[in-house]
Image (spheres, helix red, strand yellow):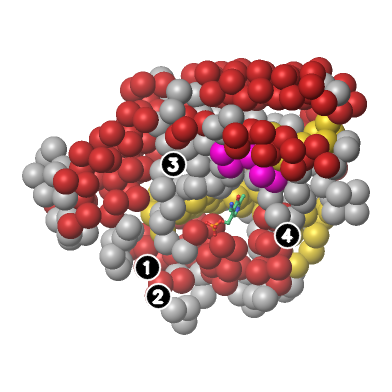
Amino acid sequence: LSANDLNFSGGPGALPHEVLLQAQQAMIALPETGLSVLGMSHRSAWFRELLDEAEQHIRDLLNLEDRYAVLFLQGGSSLQFSMIPANFAHGAKRPTEFVASGYWSGKAIGEAACAAPVKVLWDGGADGYHRLPDFEELAWNPQAPFFHYVSNETVEGLQFHQTPRMEGATVISDMSSDFLSRPIDAGRYAMIYAHAQKNLGPAGVTVAILDTALLDRIPDGLPPMLDYRTHVRHRSIYNTPPVFSLYALTLICRWLRQDIGGLDAMEAINSLKAGRLYQCLDDMGGLVIPQAERDFRSQMNVAFRFRDTRLDALCLQEAADAGFSGLGGHRSIGGLRASIYNAVLPAAVELLAEFLEDFARRHG
Ligand code: PMP
């Protein structure tokens, strides 16, 4: 395995080697046009076809009903944190509703609060974000402009393993760090969004899937770039999109369907990888403390720390010496985090698990 195969970064993360080779070739000359992908016009027929293909992959992978629009936006998931309340909670009488399950839901809540009243239905902050609520326990209001939650808390490594069944609620989910890592019941959501830089490609593009019924709720007078209707009308080519990022995203979708075999197959691989790492942490006994309680463990981000905090730094140093990268925990909680997105190979996870087992033997 190469150094790049041992990249466990939280995002931007590892991309499949096959895709990198195709992207490398496209830098010089796209097979279809003979021009560098970096110089391709966003008004070319090639690009329109590319976007149509990308959209179709996402529709097929998620079995999307026709009522959904698939948009490719810029500004990362952070811009969605502000666009969502600006579009759907403007002048609302009732507060928007949120689950505060970790660092990124905290960001979403903070940005929504700039635009609209916010009500936090459940907050895991007091005990340090180790678990998630059951959707059934939440006292949500069907009249709230929307209900928002983060399906996978990237920093803490907490993932919902259930789908909200909230008939009548406008459910919006930030799936940035687990989008296309497993099948989902897309029909339960009013909107799903995810930036590319985990499972979909390089940074620069954010996928937003929204029920077109939501478009009627948008107030007039928003700046056009911030109004979802603009992007629906222009089919994601209102201004210049990140052509290269969208090219890579399309290659990743092809890889996911043709090489991996779709989301069921991807989930099976991801479960094996996560299972191997969590087993390794569990077998280390009291030496490490996983961040997530067992039922909420993320299949994408495995966050943990050593009981003896001095071992965190030592482990990171030894891991770096052994060729692993990206294992430092997020600056907000420290410790370690192995991000095992779709493109991280099972063989790379096996090497990491063996490294951790050896580290534990030497320092346990
Ligand atoms: N949501 C989640 C779940 C994330 O993990 C991140 C970033 N890692 C963001 C939102 C913010 O994304 P961006 O940097 O694209 O604005």
Q: Earlier in the sequence, mark 1 or mark 4?
A: 4
Provide the residue designation for mark 2. 224
Is 138 or 175 nearer to us in this picture?
175
Q: Position of residue 109 (x, y in %)?
A: 71, 63
Q: Main secondary structure of the magenta part?
A: loop
Whether label 4 lies within 8 Å of ligand 1 gets the answer no
Q: Is residue 182 visible?
A: yes
Provide the residue designation for mark 3. 200
Quadrant (top left, top right, bottom left, bottom right) of the N terminus? top left
Q: As displayed, is residue 156 above or below residue 307? A: below
Provide the residue designation for mark 1. 230
Q: Earlier in the sequence, mark 3 or mark 4?
A: 4
Q: Amino acid at mark 4?
A: Gly
Q: Is residue 178 visible?
A: no
Provide the residue designation for mark 4. 106
Q: Which of the two marks, 2 or 3, is nearer to us in this view? A: 3
Q: As displayed, is residue 200 above or below residue 272? A: below
Gap between marks 1 and 4 measured at Cα? 28 Å
- Give yes or no for contact between labels 1 and 2 (Cβ–Cβ under 8 Å): yes
Residue under the image location 88 percent in, 36 percent down? 307
Inspect the magenta stretch and tell me whether residue 331 lies in it.
no
Query: Is residue 160 toward the left or the right of residue 192 in the image?
Result: right
Q: Secondary structure at mark 1?
A: helix
